[in-house]
Image (cartoon, rainbow, N blue to C red):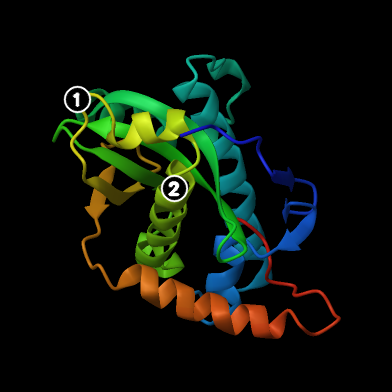
């Protein structure tokens, strides 16, 4: 089992993934484009504020997980979310494997970024995604199912990833969960997802979006966060 060169490129300025040079939809874009995420009833200003907050908090979390966070650079209004994450991580995560991990499927032509792959205190490796709002509002069950499916596909060709997920002393089950962060700094709340049909639901949504992508105009909802 050999590790192939990474075929994925991501342009954060336009939230664009290219897989083997071909533009592909993001996981979040699929969920928006298929209607699983519907934010049409929320005022634009509120959405933009939430998007900006999520971007800032996720960036700070990445540095936190890499043990390279300068707290003085974090916006005062965002610090509670980091405290919420720190409490959860200290209590429940025994080993962080990969942070801000790009995942993709060459079989299904889609890509995304999960916040964390880690071993938890239950002994299992887990695909984790942090949320600053309610996970159910953004179809976190299907989102994590996509990341989980992509990771298992990639592990067939990526030996280090296979070792991270299923090698050594790690049990051969990979779990998935969302981790809800709170502005007031209380410990984050996890939600575990077990429904084996979630990945099939995501793939059905992806089929719809691929059909839409045959249109020449770009899709305005194709954005990772």
Return the residue found at the far front.
1
Task: Give the labeled residue for mark 2.
Answer: 151
User: In terms of secondary structure, where does tag 1 sit?
Assistant: loop
Q: Residues within 10 Å of mark 2 (few under 14, many from 20)?
A: many
Image height of 181 relative to 161, above or below: below
Task: Give the labeled residue for mark 1.
Answer: 169
Tell me the quarter of the picture where residue 124 sits.
top left
Residue 38 seen: no
- Label 1 – label 2 distance at C-alpha: 19 Å
Q: Position of residue 136 (x, y in %)?
A: 36, 67
Image height of 157 relative to 168, above or below: below
Specify the quadrant that holds the C terminus. Answer: bottom right
Number of numbered discs visible in the structure rendering: 2
Q: Which of marks 1 and 2 is nearer the N terminus?
A: 2
Q: Which residue is drawn at 44% across and 72% down?
A: 202
> Could you tell whether 118 is left or right of 79 in the image?
left
Image height of 44 relative to 180, above or below: below
Q: Residue at x 64, y 49 (%)?
A: 52
Residue 49 seen: yes
Q: Position of residue 58 (x, y in %)?
A: 54, 39
Q: Position of residue 17 (x, y in %)?
A: 71, 53
Q: Are marks 1 and 2 in contact (CB under 8 Å)?
A: no
User: In terms of secondary structure, where does tag 2 sit?
Assistant: helix
Q: Which residue is drawn at 34% across and 64% down?
A: 141
């Amino acid at each position: 089992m050999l590790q192939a060169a990474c075929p994925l490129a991501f342009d954060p300025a336009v939230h664009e993934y290219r897989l083997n040079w071909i533009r592909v939809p993001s996981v979040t874009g699929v969920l928006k484009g298929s209607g699983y995420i519907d934010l049409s009833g929320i005022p634009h200003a509120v959405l933009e504020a939430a998007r900006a907050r999520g971007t800032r908090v996720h960036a700070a979390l990445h540095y936190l997980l890499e043990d390279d966070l300068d707290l003085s650079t974090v916006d005062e209004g965002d610090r509670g979310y980091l405290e919420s994450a720190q409490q959860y991580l200290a209590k429940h995560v025994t080993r962080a494997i990969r942070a801000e991990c790009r995942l993709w499927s060459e079989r299904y032509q889609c890509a995304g970024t999960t916040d964390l792959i880690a071993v938890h205190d239950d002994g299992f490796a887990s695909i984790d995604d942090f949320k600053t709002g309610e996970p159910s509002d953004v179809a976190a069950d299907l989102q994590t199912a996509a990341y989980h499916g992509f990771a298992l596909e990639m592990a067939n060709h990526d030996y280090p990833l296979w070792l991270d997920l299923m090698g050594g002393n790690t049990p051969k089950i990979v779990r998935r969960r969302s981790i809800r962060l709170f502005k007031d700094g209380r410990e984050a709340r996890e939600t575990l997802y077990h429904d084996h049909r979630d990945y099939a639901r995501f793939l059905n949504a992806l089929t719809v979006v691929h059909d839409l992508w045959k249109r020449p105009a770009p899709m305005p909802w194709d954005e990772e966060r």
